[in-house]
Image: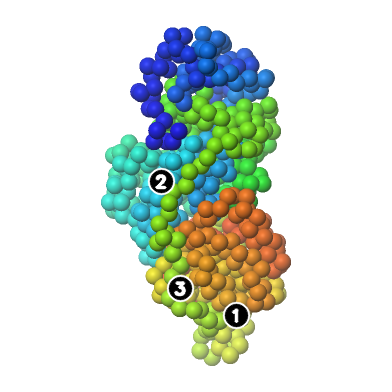
Amino acid sequence: MSNQTIKSWAEAAPRLIAVAAGRAPADSVIRGGKLVNVHTREVLDGWQVAIADGRFAYVGPDAAHCVGEYTEIVEAAGRYLIPGLCDAHMHIESGMLTPAEFARAVIPHGTTSMFTDPHEIANVLGLEGVRLMHDEALMQPVNIFTQMPSCAPSAPGLETTGYAISAEDVAEAMAWPGIIGLGEMMNFPGVVAGDPQMLAEIAATQAAGKTVGGHYASPDLGPAFHAYAAGGPADDHEGTCEADAIARVRQGMRSMMRLGSAWFDVESQITAVTEKGLDPRNFILCTDDSHSGTLVNDGHMNRVVRHAIACGADPLVALQMATINTATHFGLERELGSIAPGRRADVILTSDLVTLPIEQVIARGRTVAIDGRITVDCPHLDWPDHARNTVHLGKVLAATDFEVEAPQGANSVTAKVIGVVENQAPTKALTADLTVEDGIVLPDEAADVAQIALVERHRGTGGVTNGFVSGFGYTGKMAMASTVAHDSHHMIVVGTDRDNMALAANRLGEVGGGITVFRNGREIALVELPIAGLMSEDHAETVALKADRMVAAMAECGCTLNNAYMQHSLLALVVIPELRISDLGLVDVTKFEITDLFEEA
């Protein structure tokens, strides 16, 4: 039963009422369990659930009157019944998977609702890319809602995307059946400055009665933050400390606390609830970015809930933050997020509320996973050829394209260096004194300064922007290239050797996108991502194995960072401080302006 074919409440109501009253039999009844009521934050021992037409009909102490000759009986055997888990903010593309394969990966982990922002593909394929993601999302056996991307480019004037999203595009998308709101408003300086396009996008969303996603990636909680809140964003997931979480909820926003593959922002913020005692209904859990390895090996929203509990949250409060809080935020409290009459019958059976083993997953009234094994199909869209041919380099790149020319006559330079911060999205603006040889600035392995290049890949200009990065710890002759390069998704190449950098870049041109690692002139890892240079149609397990090999290859090149690939993919994200790289140059994100690579002598 797809998102398009599940009966609306209005269509199902006559039967739901008849089943609850005992005039008609249920499709199924779950009995012998302990029901977790997230409306009241209590556990109701022995309560039973009757399901009809994919929705809950009766929820109460005894559903015997709902049982007919053909009613399926599900024996909970003393286990807890909890609502299906909701991910409030995420990017499917970060899993390197299509919506169908992402759904297939997370359903066994108990995720039954996702609120996705496909702004990655929007930067590559524009509104058509969003529509393709939206359409495949609606084909799935669980609820995948789409937020219309708001910022492509994320920072106008500082980067060039494959396509740009307009306010007219946003207004058009608001009429699509699976659009739930506006994706994260990353251009917070634009909102603060009253940029007409940003305000028009927000106005179109609010006129449609839908939710505006926020993204305030700045530690400044002064007037700029208050101006952003006045601009309409209803939530924010960029907080990294308790003060951030408190500031957001005090302004009437929901604080979305994320645990992704590289973002560990729950522990530092959940103290606003566990220690400060703030109302937990305004706090929501999400993943933001989870790569395929995390999904296969560690889990999805079940991992986040377990982590929140480990950080001191009451298990029932943590569950609220991953179910009813999310549904309420998006105006879907009557549709999902709880085990209550009329809602979509999304429910998990688990034997423990702390360790949260996901033993059976029911979505829209039917079992979709048992003991980690999916039991339903996740249909694929027929992606068009032009969505698979998006890496346009314009020429065969050479080592000379990755040369950093020194100022005339200089024997050494003081270069601005992007400093990677482990497990966090922000970078540091560093400097390094680098040697010049034959007019070319050299990286410094001993000081952990490698080269970085942003290779234009949308229009085939042949353009390469060069700079320096620190924090990966690479040694020897190597290079790593990726067409996953948030948010404009050109190509990021990081390396210690220009020949290897050229080999890596050209290889991704050959395979149509993905991630590759070269060492001593030889490819030692490759993850092919042919759809938009961002996603694979392979199963998550297959992609995860290739990604694991990629991570191992980075380690073989000297890298010791946790989730270093995620750090690599964010080096062009020109809306998060302090220093980034784009096709237009080195970007000072504290000032939102292009800056020189070298300090003045």
Q: Secondary structure at mark 1?
A: helix
Residue at numbered disc 2: 134
Q: Are marks 3 and 1 in contact (CB under 8 Å)?
A: no
Q: Residue at x 43, y 64 (%)?
A: 390
Residue 209 picture location, percent across and down: 32, 36
Q: Is residue 100 left or right of residue 307?
A: left
Q: Secondary structure at mark 3?
A: loop
Residue 555 shows up from this direction: yes
As drawn, the residue found furthest toward the front would be 69
Residue 565 picture location, percent across and down: 60, 60
Q: Residue at x 64, y 71 (%)?
A: 523
Residue nearer the viewer, 154 or 143: 143
Q: Earlier in the sequence, mark 2 or mark 3?
A: 2
Residue 428 picture location, percent across and down: 57, 62
Q: Earlier in the sequence, mark 1 or mark 2?
A: 2
Residue at numbered disc 1: 499
Report crowding for label 2: few under 14, some 14 to 19, many 20 or more residues within 10 A (C-alpha): many
Residue nearer the viewer, 280 or 152: 152
According to the image, what is the colour scheme of the structure? rainbow
Residue 393's mark?
3
Residue 152 shows up from this direction: no
Q: Are marks 1 and 2 in contact (CB under 8 Å)?
A: no
Report crowding for label 1: few under 14, some 14 to 19, many 20 or more residues within 10 A (C-alpha): many
Quarter of the image for residue 516 reads bottom right
Q: Label 1, label 2: how many angstroms apart (C-alpha)?
A: 40 Å
Tell me: residue 329, above or below residue 520: above
Three-letter amino acid code at the position of disc 3: Leu
